[in-house]
Amino acid sequence: MRLTISRTLRLVALPLAVAGLAACGSDSPTGLRVFTGPALSVLGRGDMTARHMAEVWTRGNVAYTTTWGQRSSNGVTAVGNAVHLWRIDGTAPVLVDSLIVENATTLGDVQVSDDGRLLVVATERQNGSIVIYDLTNPLKPVRRARYQTANTSNGVHTARLARVNGTLYAFLSIDPPDARLVIVDLTDPANPREVFVRAMGNPFVHDVFVRDGLLFTALWHDGMTIWDLGGGGKGGSPSNPVQIGNVRTAAWSPSAAGSAAHNIWWLHDAAGGPYATRFAFVGEEAPGTGGSALNSSNGDIHVVDVGDVSAPREVAFYHVDGAGTHNFSVDEQRGILYAAYYNAGVRAIDVRGNLASCTAEQKAPDGRCDLRRMGRELAAGLQNGSPVYVWGVHFDGSFVYASDMLNGLWKLVATNR
Amino acid sequence: MIATLLAPRRVGAATAATAVTAVSLAVAMALPRAVARAQSPESHSSDSVGSHSPAITLRAQALGLVTRVDPALGGRAYTEGYLLQPMIMAHGRALRGHLGAVLTLDFEGLTLERGQLTPGAYGEGYVDRRHPHTYLHEALGVAEGAFRGTGVSLAGGKGFVPFGTDDPMMRPFAAYPVNHHLAQILERYALIGAVRRGPFSVEAALFNGDEPRSPGAPPDVERFGDSWAVRVTATVPRSLELVGSYAFVTSPELVTGGGLDQRKWSAAARFDHPTGLVRYALVEWAHTDAFFGDVRTNRFTSFLAEGSAVARPVTLSARFEDTTRPEEERLLDPFRTSRSPTDLGIIGITRWRTGTVAASIERSLGSIDVAPFVEATYARPTDELRPSAFVPREFYGASSVWALSAGVRLGAGRMPHRMGRYGAALPNVAPTMTGGPHVGH
């Protein structure tokens, strides 16, 4: 078949036009809006650059941090299999010891039980488990058990300790495929006993919060579900949670895929009043745009009215341009929520009072109250220009400790109104 | 020597695969050669689904390889040997060509569980190693007809999605390019319609988005239809092919769904001629955008150019590639990544610039095609984002990576079909015969 030159050119141009349509620009993270208000004062930092720091928990004068993923230097790669112990009674945290968890590449959550007796660490990706340590000597944890079963082996993404009717439980959110919640009785720490397992989440359950016999589950695109464990009057228990209510929180962007409900905190404001236990905070963890871990994030804090736990509803939110929230720690004496904000450091938000009441100017177009427009943004930390990527925060009554994946453990002065 | 380089626990399985391949080669040699018409333009013209008796074409092939990558990670060189692509391919047709069947069995699940060392390769939970393909690589039925000068076909089963370019298995190199998961979509349940008129063809497909979880795991049939693709091809003139394609793939990396979706683009020009100095050339551009709903999270791009020339008795091939690769958390085996990422984020992006050269000699030993070859790759990976949880220079212990390979390709029987195209989508370009420079690896 003979082709004219013009027809040939058209035939060449047609498919190759697809190439011309492509944007050749490379990815770069969306710009971060830096907070210009008061800064949380930094007292010091315990450096950690051999591994990426993950979560933090403090008890007394000791902080415990976990590690994540791999970090390489000069061809030597260290994986996230270490728990680091820090003395925090000085200005800057001081690394004093490490625990190595065998056959692990990422440790996620770390938590000390309410009575200070146990330290529990989650292992993820492979050989999913929780490792349980005795804290008779807080600086010398002694392993009591490593709990790993077929139900946990996919990876324990988060582990929460909570006491229900006097019994200590661990609530384990298990990685997909076959994402599930596993509840383990820790009455005998050397011999944990599984009491409940159920598939849940869309597509996974990410984290939980337990208080007053209620279980709050962060179910990703299924939002937040509230369950009765014995405090909700529905006949539930840790071995048989009964669903009470659900809310699918909004996405940080109308174009985003869904709720990405990541973590939860049900506020009990020590000041009391009609709103003291009215609100729960749901963190949204959406992937960053144009970036990756350590340089980009998205996701808002969503305020949910749980006055009627059978019909929770979102009433407000907090948003930071160019960054997303991760884990929380709340100063319930002062009604201040501290949020780890990845590449935006740490944010302190006034969460006391009626968060559902705001003026028309303080509302978003969808009717939710905007906490920033309400002036509830109190302070920000670690926004001095050097890159940070804050995974977790822990408020110990006086100070805020922030685990920075890039640099180490920061000690910040807590704020007030 | 190769046996000693194989992981000991897989020697039994590798032996089984070797035995299967050997038997298949023998069968392919012994099977009476059916009259398989050359894929000439006439055979695929609109009026040419003509009177042909039922025909079966069979081919078996395998590739033995020893490769050294330096450094593979942490400043250390790795040397390994494999039996790659032990395959049986079959094509049958009946009812004067109106019905056809395509079958490709690939036994890499037995011989390549650990993956093939390939700098920059990634996908399906493997990194810096090419993953093994599924046992049932292709299995489709094809119905084909012609109406008033227009060829039409409908293919259904498991196979290639009409997107991108030919599978690297059918191209000159033993090492797959980094862009394999940007430039091809394969091993899915697919329903593919194709229309051909003159030099143009259009294909459209519905398929399941989830990537294979293992060589033996079938796709999730409940996800069939959650993804789609379209490809346009122009053949200008008989040996030059221009292709553009687009695909929307739902949550390929999270089998349960709910992961990031992909919107994929590809454009390519391909030259393929059985005679002359330059036998084959391909220029390809591809990009994939990852989406969280309608929010683009990342973009991955690729440019690739490769070609082969024959200077008898040697075939010389060269490839250049510039491709960005997403980085994921690695497992205890540093060549494996988590298949079920929570939080949906990546830990970095690496740009791989690679150059590969290969030389091979085609011979025939009776009915068996034998093609020994050598191949060398030089790669420079660099981090695209900073700070990043994956810094190539720190991880590999060097700013560049070398790979050297030597091996032999074996094959028996005629190449039954151009892998990845079915029915009316087969272009009016005569593929190089078995034993040619870049087909029948």
Image (tube, grey):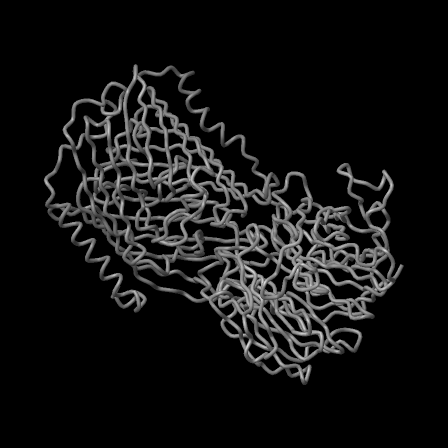
- Residue A16 vs residue A135: left or right? left
Tally of numbered discs: 0
Q: Is residue B379 visible?
A: yes
Viewer-side residue, B105 vs B243: B105
- Residue B291 vs residue A310: left or right? left
Q: Position of residue A55 (x, y in %)?
A: 66, 66
Quadrant housing residue B185: top left
Quadrant housing residue B52: top left
- Residue A66 vs residue B8: left or right? right
Q: Is residue A70 visible?
A: no
Q: Position of residue A188 (x, y in %)?
A: 59, 79
Q: Position of residue B183 (x, y in %)?
A: 43, 41
Q: Residue at x 21, y 27 (%)?
A: B97
Q: Residue at x 19, y 22 (%)?
A: B50
Give the position of the C terminus of chain A as an image quadrant. Answer: bottom right
Q: Residue at x 52, y 63 (%)?
A: A155
Q: Would you place residue B28 above or below residue B338 in this image?
A: above
Q: Residue at x 59, y 63 (%)?
A: A240
Viewer-side residue, A89 vs A262: A262
Q: Position of residue A212 (x, y in %)?
A: 73, 65
Give the position of the N terminus of chain A as an image quadrant. Answer: top left
Q: Would you place residue B108 above or below residue B229 in this image?
A: below
